[in-house]
Image (cartoon, grey):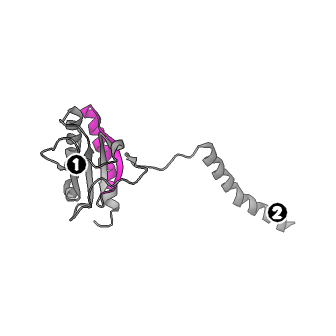
Amino acid sequence: MAKKKFLVLFLLCSLLPLAFAQAFLSLGWFGSATTNKGQWLKEEIILLPAASGDVHWRLVYVTNETECTIRCQNAHYGMQQVYTALGRKQQHLDLWQTGGHKPQVLQWQPLPAGVEQLQQQLVLVDMQGLALMTYPVAEDKTQMVQTGKAILTDLNKLLKYDRGL
């Protein structure tokens, strides 16, 4: 009798947590644990050539505008704010623009083929040139400041876990 009681208690203690876990997952009571602020890209897109030197990350404004509009100016402003806020980690980030007009303060490259879904967005690119995350470019400067803070949060996490640093 004691063996049956032990077996029943053992099975309850083992299976009950599994049943609760299954219920939480299937009913959607469990929140996802993502902490990133940007949108991860679902497919692999090589946006820039591989970086050389200490640069591990690049922030790229993807556009096809021939003139710098308000959106373009806000993108450049947000990029400069992120770069300035990095402080001593600035050496690990380059600011780029692909397509459109050639800016004076950013590195520039012609718009590669097949990146239409990245138009008018800021893209975080790794040292191999692979586009990882996208962020919207706002028409309003205060919204662009919030986007800059989101980029800075994600970039600081990536810099922290980067093995090369």
Report which residue position mark 2 lands on: 5
**Dot 2, how many residues are within 10 Å of its Cα: few (below 14), some (14-19), or many (20+)?**
few
Mark 1 to mark 2: distance in Å? 74 Å
Mark earlier in primary sequence (1, 2): 2
Mark drawn on residue 15 = none
Range of magenta residues: 129-156
Residue 19 pos. (x, y %): 69, 52
For numbered disc 2, what is the local secondary structure?
helix
**Hey, which residue is sitting farthest right in the picture?**
1
Type of amino acid under label 2: Lys
**The N terminus sits in image quarter:** bottom right
Task: Give whichever of 139, 114 is nearer the camera.
Answer: 114
- Quadrant hosting residue 99: top left
Q: Is residue 31 left or right of residue 62?
A: right
**The C terminus sits in image quarter:** bottom left
Q: Is residue 96 left or right of residue 3?
A: left
Type of amino acid under label 1: Pro
For numbered disc 1, what is the local secondary structure?
loop
- Quadrant hosting residue 140: top left
Residue 149 pos. (x, y %): 29, 44
Task: Give whichever of 161, 44 is nearer the camera.
Answer: 44
Residue 107 pos. (x, y %): 17, 51
- Residue positioned 29% across, 35% down in the render: 138
Circles 1 and 2 in contact, beta carbons < 8 Å: no
Residue 131 among magenta residues: yes
Report which residue position mark 1 lands on: 110
Residue 130 pos. (x, y %): 33, 56
- Residue positioned 71% across, 58% down in the render: 15
